[in-house]
Amino acid sequence: MSDGKKIERPLSPFMLGPYYRLQLTSITSILTRITGNALAISAVLFVWWLLAAATSPEAFARADGILTSFIGHIALILSLWGVWYHYLAGLRHLYWDTGRGLDIPTAEKLGWAVIVGSVVLTIVTIIVI
Amino acid sequence: MRFLTDRKRAEGRGAAGSGTAHHWHMQISAFGLALVVPAFLYVFGSSLGKTHAEVLDIFSRPFPAVVTALVLVVGMIHFRKGAQTMIEDYSDGITRKVLIMSVAAFSYALIATGLFALAKIAL
């Protein structure tokens, strides 16, 4: 029974590192959250570019110039990797939600599949498009 | 002193008040996005670096326009609910409420802006 006093525990994710040994499953989990939330920035970039295209040739030239610049390319390649990472990690969650693949050896294999798969799919997408 | 047991708090719709509705919605939108995101990557990827006229031409065609609209609407609602989970993990009280409302406002604003741009290009 609780005596009503609040127990001071490290709040997630701040237990990572000092109290909690980093492992593949926890790293791939937090990367899912980071990529998913960071993709909001990618969405803003895309909508800004699309709105510029709808507005005028001058506005499009400005937005397109930034997206196809060196920094723009880095942002878009990171976004592409973020999409593929979150995509594969999401499929992994849907698989886990069926009650399968939750034992540690399988979970670790799935973790490597998400990491390697996201890099491969990113490179393939850049080559194909 | 509250006389509710842990069991009682978890029964019915549980502490969230909405049961598994949030999680179930994430599963549904994840499935939908899995179908449509690769097509969107192709549409956006192949239109990058093209001239203004070519970009307008691409997004006025039905398939690219519909795929883009779907990714925007489903993607941003998926984001809104996913970001909400993150906010609920790291904050509470009034901060939590304000952050959740702000994320919702941001998500719907981006959806509306994107759909406006698409409509203006396509019509």
Image (cartoon, coloured by chain):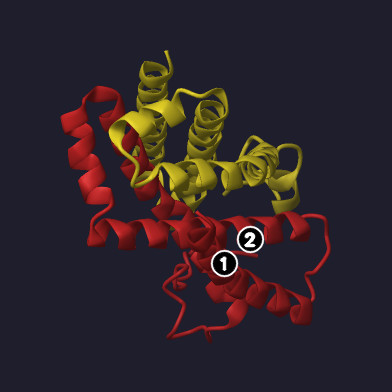
Which chain's colour is red?
A
Residue A118 numbered tag:
1
Residue A59 rendering spot, x and y as whole percentages = 19, 32
Q: Which of marks 1 and 2 is nearer the N terminus?
A: 2
Give, as a three-letter code, the residue at label 1.
Ser
Q: In this view, does A66 lie to the left or right of A32?
A: left
Q: Colour of chain B?
A: yellow
Residue A64 rendering spot, x and y as whole percentages = 26, 43
Q: Do the residues labelled 1 and 2 touch (CB within 8 Å)?
A: yes
Camera-nearest residue between A118 and B11: A118
Which residue position holds label 2? A88
Q: What residue sits 53% from the left and 46% below the top?
A: B42
Secondary element at tag 1: helix
Q: Quadrant of the C terminus of chain B?
A: top left
Secondary element at tag 2: helix
**Residue A4 seen from this side:** no
Chain letter for mark 1: A
Camera-nearest residue between B46 and B19: B46
